[in-house]
Image (spheres, helix red, strand yellow):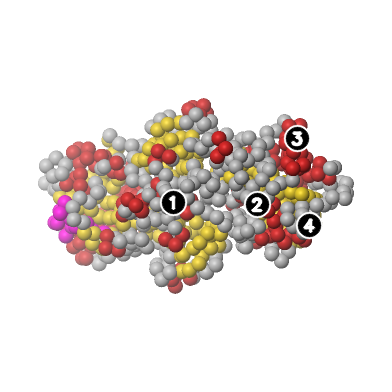
Amino acid sequence: MNLKETIIKLSEAVGASGAETPAAETALDMLKKYCPDAEIINGNVIGRYSTHRDGLPSLVLDAHIDQIGMVVTYITDSGFVKVGNLGGLDRRLLPAQQVVIHGKKDIKGVICSVPPHLSRDDGKVPEIDDIAIDTGYSKAELEKIVSLGDSITFDVKCRCLAGNRITGGALDDRCGVAAILYALELLENRETAYNVTVIFSTQEELGERGAKIGGFALAPDVAIAVDVSFAYAEGEDEKKCGYLGKGAMIGISPCLSREISQGLINAAESANLPYQHEVMNGLTSTNADQYAVAREGAKACTLSIPLRNMHTPVEVIDIDDVRNTAEILAEFMGRAAE
Amino acid sequence: MKELLKELCLINGTSGDETLVRNAIIEKIKDYCEYRVDNLGNLIAFCIGKKSSEKKLMIAAHMDEVGFIVMYIRNDGTLCFNEVGGVDTSVVIGRQVTVGNNGICGVVGSTAIHNLSKEQRESAPKYADMYIDIGADSKEEAEKMVSLGDSVYFDSEFAELGGNCVKSKAIDDRAGCALMIQLIREGVDYDTYFVFNVQEEVGLRGSTVSSFAVAPDFAIVLEATTASDIDGVGGAKKVCSLGNGPVVSFMDRSTIYDKELYRMAFDIAAEFGIPCQTKTMIAGGNDSGAIHKSRGGVRTIAVSAPCRYIHSPSCVINMEDFENMLILTRELAKRIHEL
């Protein structure tokens, strides 16, 4: 598979939290190549990899399929669309952004921006209640296309930057989805030490809800959440960040399994793969937190792809980090079998 | 007209760096008029009319758009930049941009929302705190792609919205340029100068010299002007509204317009059955500010497309307003000669 093309296709697919279907179907099509029986169950894309054999521990590879966005809450008499947020939105960068409202058909809109002669010039950022979307349509026209509860996403295409870096709108966590798919490709014809199941889960941005029910359904022994984490950039706290291009970030936390963290580190080191540590002192705010306590518990870990500008339309990743993440995963699953 | 507008808006040309815009315009008008380019880069075209007139008329629009300029390249390969013309930082943060004329892609990044203090989340960013990330990891790598002084543009598509509206960067003032190209190509009744100005956004600099050179008696300035008929804004603060026709104002921050021309515009609109509106706040300004005070004074009117989110990557205008500007301007040009 062409990793860059896969990431771009996934990132440009649409699936705000609670409205993941288009992105989930895109991912499902891709997953079926490796897991022919994959299907969408209660929103989550779930597929069993290879033949599961008795006696092996079960392992879940998770990436979330949802992206941050907005939801239509009201249409004003003059035809502006009022919204609520889906996930953590940076309101500072909303004015004049181009968005798509996913109604009966997709329509484009622009987030209203108050011109300088009216802004109080106090540098205040609009509240979510102040946000409105201009579609050009009247209320009557809009009501034929848009219903309350429809989702809204940033209208953004991926662009290639220097080196192997790309920018896009939903790289969190479609690059994680791509990393898992690529790991399965690397594994082909290799024995695994686990009965591996893949899940692309919903509603992570709203509190890991898809993983909550997915964890119950799959009841894994081991779970690895493949997500994104903070890559250092000007303005970020270097102590809390990984670096772009320096490899996947292996999570270490009181809430994670030390055994799996070490297993991932061993896999990386034995194959001479670069990696970075991501030390947390409690909950990880990823789906790993859900798998760890699903049913009777699982040995959970995070494997994160460093990403800049998280939750903005200009997220940035390095493709090499996605490839490296897949390589560590494949090495971890395959190595233990040998 | 929509195709012409789209083509012009998607060309990059900020103040002082209008060459690509000017070249595209020359290609479109060269078979229809005489033209020259002055020392600042203004494109001055002259169209011979079917009739000659004692009065000298100049129609003007500006070619430049607001944008940014690379001021410094840091050791980590990121670019420090500042605005060219007035651009609110809230429409800059979190955008894709194009750096220089080689089309280098970049983004204006932002510290992740998760890592901002409550105070930081609630305050608009400053240019000094923003940077462009082109993916380079070092100054040396960045310098292979970018030079100090490179112009930077919004990377923003031209999109059709509902209600016959369109959305793009640079509608201010490629809308005026498009109308002038159309007028040149369809031919004029009376001899007319058409001036495509540079550097409007940095202080009306192009129009200062071109209006001196042309020395007109009358001027029609074609523009896009701030409309804030948006959610939560009512009454006079809307200034003007999309769909209510071309905007002809009696006064703005730079000009008190010629009263007779002002009335003439509304009379024409009434006769032709097209809407026409004035501004309900004294706001904004345009090349009229330089033109009306040129030499011994120029009787000046501005005809503008009401434009939401002006000076952003997502300017929005109504195409009917735009078409009506053409009708109004065409007739104004004729009647000014017959005054």
- Residue B129 is left or right of residue A224, and the answer is right
User: Mark 3 and mark 4, same subunit?
Assistant: yes
Tag 4 subunit: B
Within 10 Å of disc 4 (Cα), the crowding (few <14, some 14-19, many 20+) is few
User: In the rendered structure, which segment of residues is drawn in magenta?
Assistant: A249-262
The chain ID associated with circle 3 is B
Q: Quadrant of the N terminus of chain B?
A: top right
The amino acid beneath tag 4 is Gly
Residue A95 appears in the figure: yes
Q: Is residue A256 magenta?
A: yes
Query: Is there one chain holding both mark 2 and mark 1?
Result: no
Q: Do the residues at discs 1 and 3 belong to one chain? A: no
Task: State how far apart marks 2 and 1 are (Cα).
Answer: 26 Å
Please state which of residues A156 and B319 is positioned toward the viewer in this rendering: B319
Q: Image point 18% across, 38% down: which residue?
A: A216
Q: Amino acid at mark 2?
A: Ser
Q: Secondary structure at mark 1?
A: loop
| Snapshot quadrant of residue B296 | bottom right
- Amino acid under disc 1: Gly
User: Which amino acid is tagged 3?
Assistant: Asp
Quadrant position of the C terminus of chain B in the picture: top right
Q: Which residue is mark 1?
A: A123
Q: Chain of mark 1?
A: A
Question: Residue tagged by mark 3?
Answer: B267
Are the two marked residues, 3 and 4, in contact with CB atoms closer than 8 angstroms?
no
**Residue A7 appears anywhere in the view:** no
Which mark is drawn over residue B296?
A: 4
Label 2: which secondary element: loop
Cα distance between the residues tagged 3 and 2: 24 Å
- Mark 1 vs mark 3, CA separation in Å: 43 Å
